Image: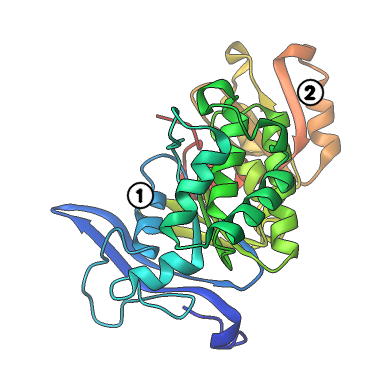
Amino acid sequence: MTDKNNSADEIAVEVEYVFKHFNAFQAVSDLSFCVPKATCFALLGPNGAGKTTMMNMLIGRILRDKISHSKISVLGYDPNKNELEIKYNTGIVPQENNLDVELTVIENLMVYSKFYGIPKKEASKRIHELLSFMELSEKRSSLIKQISGGMQRRLIIARALLNAPCLLILDEPTTGLDPQVRQAIWDKLRILKASGVTILLTTHYMDEAHQLCDNLLIMHQGKKIIEGNPHNLIRDHMEAYVLEIINKQLFNDTYCNTLRCERTATRLMLYTNQFEDLQTLSKTFGAADYVLRPTNLEDLFLKVTGRGLNDG
């Protein structure tokens, strides 16, 4: 539900009691959250959690179930009724690279500008600014099939900004990209947020959500599991440290008599607020057998769902 401390004109996205069924399959169940303007919010969860379905309901591509008191408001519009109004005020970055590979970088943007009815002179100026912002000016005349996957993702973000949206929606924006490219995209998203753009993204990269987001919501099997500021969630719900045992031959359930344990297919995690306890235990292992570190969102996800983010 909407935070009573946030007035309606401060909210970019409001979702209340939303459900979505595909025949007997329940893709989204009783989901509520709100996104204040000029903030970054993430829907976090594994493949199949319902993130993309929720995003598609926000932009009107999928209609939510008709249930009493159910509500979606995007920039003040109901996507079930005002899909076009949302389209013209929102930038969309889809999960797939859906550029026209037979056109150049600048041609892709020019074609897209026509969908918004942007006059040619204005479009040319805007495209020049966006190519500079996304560091693609030198590739303006290159065919799409001649540029890297990371450049294609940056171009898709530039395309989503053509209409100067106040809300940018990104579905898995950095999936499959190397860490350096991901970091470069994160830097651009931070600049956009600082300029007043509201950012709503889905991701299964915990570090992406932690780095970028003011608030996040963890979804699992279509339901909200937990929501809040990433730093506060870790502080309030997790121990401070974890010892990951990564050598299966060293897995020993007796550790769980004194420490909280979580197990995945490949790791045994031991949690405590006492760093010295884990440090002492780690000295009995070889250097390649463990990782001793502060807890993070991956650990929170494992705790609240009972599974690792990338478990099958």
Q: CA distance from mark 1 to mark 2?
A: 35 Å
- The answer to which of 92 and 155 lies nearer the viewer is 155
The picture places residue 269, in percent across and down from the top left corner, at 63, 32
**Vertical arrangement, residue 126 with respect to residue 292, above or below:** below
Residue that badge 2 annotates: 282
Measured from the top left, where is residue 192 in percent x and y?
70, 58
x then y, percent, for residue 159 = 54, 49
Report which quarter residue 232 is drawn in.
bottom right
The image quarter containing residue 180 is top right
Residue ID at (65%, 58%): 233
- Measured from the top left, where is residue 229 in percent x and y? 66, 62
- Is 72 displayed left or right of 239 in the figure? left
Q: Residue at x 68, y 49 (%)?
A: 128
Q: Is residue 41 visible?
A: no
Q: Which residue is more in the foreground, 30 or 307?
A: 30
20 relative position to 220: left or right: left
Q: Indicate the quadrant containing the C terminus: top left, top right, bottom left or bottom right.
A: top left
Quadrant hosting residue 114: bottom left
Q: Residue 221: which disc?
A: 1
